[in-house]
Image (cartoon, rainbow, N blue to C red):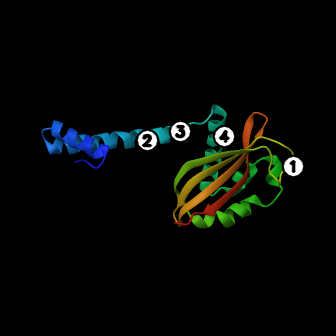
């Protein structure tokens, strides 16, 4: 006597398949296809950005390449004009980014929107982009690049690095 419907189904399926190894193979194949479908579906969802968001992401990545090269003065000059005078950005980058060493891996992780940022007056279109990154001397970190829409272009207005506890 079968204790549940699932057990009954499996026994009938096994009886209909002459070779038990073939049955196991079919089952494994089905789970593999389901896992692959879910993984591809999740990947497609994670990479789906509007054309404007993709332009912002590319702007952030290009700016991060300048940071990665150690050219902190140029990176500071590339930031939005309204935030350039807030602090010595080149010194900030040298203090917070340089000790981590060269970037080993960087992957886009998250996008958030905001109409305002408390430190910057006026309502604008802001994007908070997070990247999961690893560096030569820090294996897990989240880099956050905040961009502001200035006319037709995206400009960097904030950058921070947060350690990830593993």
Sequence-wise first label, 4 or 1: 4
Q: Position of residue 65 (x, y in %)?
A: 60, 50
- In contact (CB < 8 Å): disc 3 and disc 1: no
The answer to whether residue 41 of the structure is visible from this angle is yes
- Asked if the residue at tag 2 contacts the one at tag 1, i.e. Cβ–Cβ closer than 8 Å, the answer is no
The mark tally for this picture is: 4
The disc at residue 76 is none
- Badge 3 or badge 1: first in the primary sequence: 3
Question: Horizontally, is 158 left or right of 11 in the view?
Answer: right
The mark nearer the N terminus, 2 or 4, is: 2
User: Which element type, helix, strand or loop, lies under badge 4?
Assistant: helix
SS for callout 3: helix
| C-alpha gap between disc 1 and disc 2 | 43 Å
Residue placed most toward the observer, 88 or 29: 29
Residue placed at 72% from the left, 40% from the top? 154
In this view, the mark in front (4 or 1) = 1
Residue to which mark 3 is pinned: 45
Distance CA(mark 4)–CA(mark 1): 21 Å
Q: Residues within 10 Å of mark 1 (few under 14, many from 20)?
A: few
Is residue 29 positioned above or below 142 on the image? above
Query: Dot 4: within a 10 Å radius of its alpha carbon, few (fewer than 14), some, or many (20 or more) residues?
Result: many
Q: CA distance from mark 2 to mark 4?
A: 28 Å
Number of the label disc, if any, that sits on residue 121: 1
Find residue 142 and report its horizontal and vertical position in percent. Answer: 60, 57
Task: Tell me the distance, in whole angstroms, between the alpha carbons under discs 3 and 4.
Answer: 18 Å
- Can you identify the residue that label 4 sits on? 56
Q: Which residue is mark 2?
A: 38
């Amino acid at each position: 006597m079968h204790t549940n419907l699932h057990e009954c189904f499996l026994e009938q399926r096994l009886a209909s398949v002459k070779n038990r190894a073939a049955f196991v193979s079919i089952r494994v194949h089905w789970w593999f296809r389901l896992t692959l479908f879910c993984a591809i579906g999740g990947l497609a969802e994670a990479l789906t950005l509007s054309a404007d968001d993709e332009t912002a992401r590319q702007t952030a990545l290009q700016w991060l390449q300048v940071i990665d090269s150690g050219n902190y003065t140029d990176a500071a000059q590339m930031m939005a004009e309204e935030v350039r005078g807030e602090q010595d950005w080149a010194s900030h980058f040298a203090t917070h980014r340089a000790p981590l060493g060269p970037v080993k891996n960087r992957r886009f992780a998250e996008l958030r929107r905001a109409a305002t940022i408390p430190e910057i007056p006026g309502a604008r279109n802001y994007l908070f982009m997070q990247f999961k990154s690893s560096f030569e001397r820090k294996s897990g970190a989240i880099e956050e690049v905040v961009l502001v829409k200035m006319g037709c272009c995206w400009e960097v207005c904030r950058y921070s690095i947060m350690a990830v506890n593993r």
